Image (cartoon, rainbow, N blue to C red):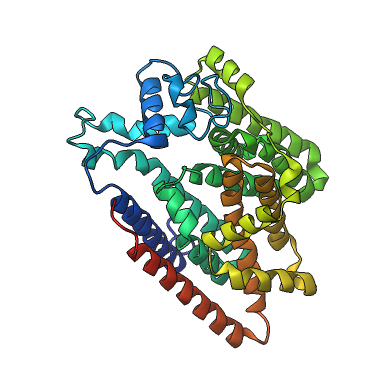
Amino acid sequence: MRPYFTRERFGRPQFLAGLLLLCFLGQALWLVHAELPTAHEPDGPEAVRISEGWKQWHGRGIAAAPLLDPDVTVQYPFRSDNSGFDTEQSPLLYIASAAPLLIWPQDLSNDSAAYWRWLPRIPFLACGVFLGASLWYVARRLCGNTGGFVALTFYCFSPSLIQASAVWHAEPEIVSAWGAFGAIFTAIAVAHTLYAPREVVLWNWRRIVLLGISLAIAVGSQFSLIVLLPMALGFLLYVAPVRRQAGVVIWIAACVVGFILLTAVYFFHWHAFVESMRHAEFWGATWRGFTVLGVYKQVAVQIGRACPALALALPVAVVTYAVWPRTRYFGNTAPLLVAVLFFALGMAHPDLAGAGFLLAAIPFLFIFVAGVLADLLETSYRPLVAACIVVLLLTYVARTLFALAQVPQG
């Protein structure tokens, strides 16, 4: 049996990637520290998430299905009707926010708030680190070590992703972004294994479960990410056209796993689950946003906020992709297509679901840009390209760290 702890799995690249992820975690922790300097209880959306999750963990109903206090429908951003049901997400984010508080041995009083208020942020900080690790793994497989480090550096110093992981004056959209990323690339990975001459379904059970988990996380944190189901099926059928029947079977099995996990989020309370699905908005898109110039400007602003370095790197990558046929292979094209689709869906959703799509598109954009830059590094202009990339990344990192240093307390 091949040993697991090898230099291929735990070598210098993995060590350096781990250091970058620690930098990402440190920046997110700094934001949390800056926001929670005083001992007061949480308010606004975070308070609703905690109280509703606490309600479900203690058997007093299902979180936001319906809300314990219907009056908060005006204050809480994930409301679109007055039914008391959360129409945009399942109880997943609620129970995730409240779960760490179960280990707190004391009452959740105002006197100890400076300590226990850190706990609800832990699941989202973990999701941010897991998404970064997933991006590193995929980018390294597609683009090599250099492309992997470029993509991971983009990620680890992204202001928007750091903010989403820290839930710093923002919603925890990092969960849906991680689920979407995992669903797409797990589907692609499963499709590639279909070329092996083995028993398809039984051999792939681990990846089937992983795909089901990713779908459950994505759809559970944002109902409109149901679009991932046909997208995953499309990649399965495209990547493995010779075994499409097996691909459909795997897709169905993963959907069943995801459905079971989604009902588990409701603690298998079928009535609450059915009612929640009846009120859920799985689409809610409008095409009017595509006729408004300001919407396009807002998308450009969001990309710039997510990664200021993309202001230079993205146009270079797009032009190179358009004029150089060598860059137009599946490893570059797939993340670009997913990013463009998510941007389009973000424009079509004027509510907070649109913000979720925009954030979910950013990691795919990182992989596309890193892949094209890695291709440019293989040309005769490698010294010039490498120098430009190093300067760009150093400037990007310095800008993010300087902005974090300016964050006020409170």
Which image quadrant is residue 348 in? top right
Residue 187 horizontal/vertical position (percent): 66, 45
Residue 317 horizontal/vertical position (percent): 67, 70
Query: Is residue 190 visible to the viewer in this orientation of the structure?
Result: no
In the rendered view, tell whether residue 331 sits above or below residue 164.
Answer: below
Residue 389 horizontal/vertical position (percent): 55, 78
Q: Residue at x 63, y 27 (%)?
A: 256
Residue 61 horizontal/vertical position (percent): 43, 16
Q: Nearer the viewer, residue 113 or 323?
A: 113
Q: Residue at x 31, y 58 (%)?
A: 408
- In the displayed structure, does residue 255 sit left or right of residue 9? right
- In the displayed structure, does residue 3 sit left or right of residue 102? right
In this view, the residue farthest toward the left is 111
Q: Nearer the viewer, residue 135 or 9?
A: 135
Q: How many marks?
A: 0
Q: Residue at x 24, y 32 (%)?
A: 104
Q: Residue at x 51, y 17 (%)?
A: 268
Query: Is residue 255 visible to the viewer in this orientation of the structure?
Result: yes
In this view, the residue farthest toward the right is 242
In the rendered view, tell whether residue 381 sits above or below residue 314.
Answer: below
Which image quadrant is residue 298 in? bottom right
